[in-house]
Image (spheres, grey):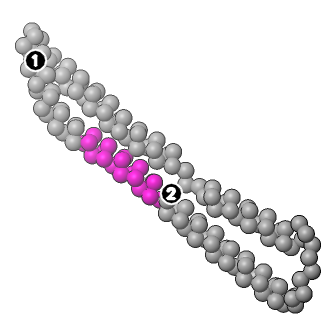
């Protein structure tokens, strides 16, 4: 860095430095706000996926357990099983399938939510660069 002599008064130099630092921090705050907004939007999207999965799970339990259990039970009875055993087995099979579907949707939503890091990487890097510039100017 070339050393050059600035003939401006110290008060003017200090005022300029304060104005530059103030503007710099305003820009950093704006960047942090933008980054927080992006992270929040990502988190909201993940929560929406999670809620859709939960709604499907609840709907699936209500609808499938009442309709499919009876249908599968009737099929098993037609295959020679007793009615009590057919009802119990069909309820267990349908319950496991519905539980697996619900688990898949919920775990997908949770993993997406965990994967969206709520960190301010760009802001931190920009602040570090700005701090280095300020240190360089003060030396």
- Closest to the observer: 82 or 131? 131
Q: Which residue is drawn at 27% across and 40% down?
A: 57
| Quadrant of image for the C terminus | bottom right
Residue 4 place in picture, x, y as percent: 91, 76
Q: Residue at x 55, y 67 (%)?
A: 33
Q: Residue at x 46, y 47 (%)?
A: 113
Residue 86 place in picture, x, y as percent: 14, 18
Q: Is residue 56 magenta?
A: yes
Residue indicated by mark 2: 39
Residue 84 place in picture, x, y as percent: 12, 18
Q: In this view, does 2 lie above or below 108?
A: below
Residue indicated by mark 1: 75
User: Which numbered disc flags the more N-terminal residue, 2 or 1?
Assistant: 2
Give left or right: position of 66 versus 26.
Answer: left
Residue 50 place in picture, x, y as percent: 37, 46
Quarter location, residue 103: top left
């Amino acid at each position: 860095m070339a050393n050059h002599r600035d003939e401006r008064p110290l008060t003017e130099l200090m005022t300029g430095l304060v104005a530059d630092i103030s503007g710099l921090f305003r820009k950093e705050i704006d960047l942090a706000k933008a980054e927080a907004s992006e992270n929040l939007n990502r988190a909201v999207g993940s929560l929406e996926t999670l809620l859709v999965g939960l709604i499907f799970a609840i709907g699936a339990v209500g609808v499938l357990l009442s309709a499919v259990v009876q249908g599968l039970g009737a099929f098993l009875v037609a295959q020679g099983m007793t009615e009590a055993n057919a009802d119990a087995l069909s309820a267990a099979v349908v319950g496991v399938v519905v539980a697996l579907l619900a688990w898949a949707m919920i775990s997908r939503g949770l993993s997406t939510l965990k994967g969206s890091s709520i960190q301010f990487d760009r802001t931190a890097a920009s602040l570090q660069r700005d701090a280095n510039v300020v240190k360089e100017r003060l030396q």
